[in-house]
Image (tube, rainbow, N blue to C red):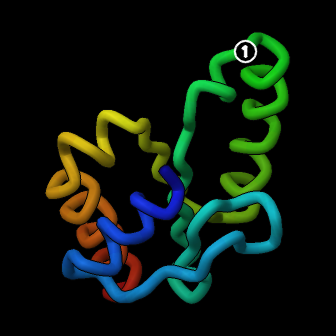
Amino acid sequence: METRLRLVLVLGDPPRPQAQWPVWLDLAYPDERIGVEHDGAAHLRPDAVLRDIGRHTAPLDQGWHVFRYTRDDVRHRPDLVVAQVGRALARARCT
């Protein structure tokens, strides 16, 4: 699903993201400090939820804006993914 999410962005309007950015982000636009994560079924286990909270907070603490998407977003709402990430990139580039 991470590959599909990457393809949604690559085939959409935003530029190509970098994959597996310093381990804690599935996809990243480092210059704009924007991360994109796919949260699959494994992220719903109680131990994973607890681990992901800290994992999600770390980049926020460093000034990153992180988008989190599910399989349904990637499969059924790819235009939404592209639009949201594209708007964030545009905002980041204006500052």
Q: Nearer the viewer, residue 34 or 72?
A: 72
The kind of residue on which mark 1 rests is: Arg
Residue that carries the numbered disc 1 in the rendered image: 45
Name the one closer to the observer, 70 or 63: 70
- Say above or below: 30 vs 49: below
- Quarter assignment of residue 43: top right
33 relative to 71, above or below: below
- Horizontal side, residue 1 vs residue 89: left or right: right
In the orientation shown, which residue stands out farthest toward the left? 79
Q: Quadrant of the C terminus?
A: bottom left
64 shown above or below 45: below
Q: Vertical placement of 58 versus 43: above or below?
A: below
Badge 1 marks a residue whose secondary structure is loop
Q: Residue at x 81, y 72 (%)?
A: 22
Q: Residue at x 30, y 41 (%)?
A: 73
Q: Viewed as shown, does residue 21 lie left or right of 94?
A: right
Where is residue 3 drawn, in percent x and y? 49, 63
The residue under the point 65% across, 64% down is: 63
Residue 46, x across and y down, in percent: 77, 11
- Residue shown at 70% from the left, 43% from the top: 56
- Mark 1 is surrounded, within 10 Å at the Cα level, by few (under 14), some (14 to 19) or many (20 or more) other residues, namely few
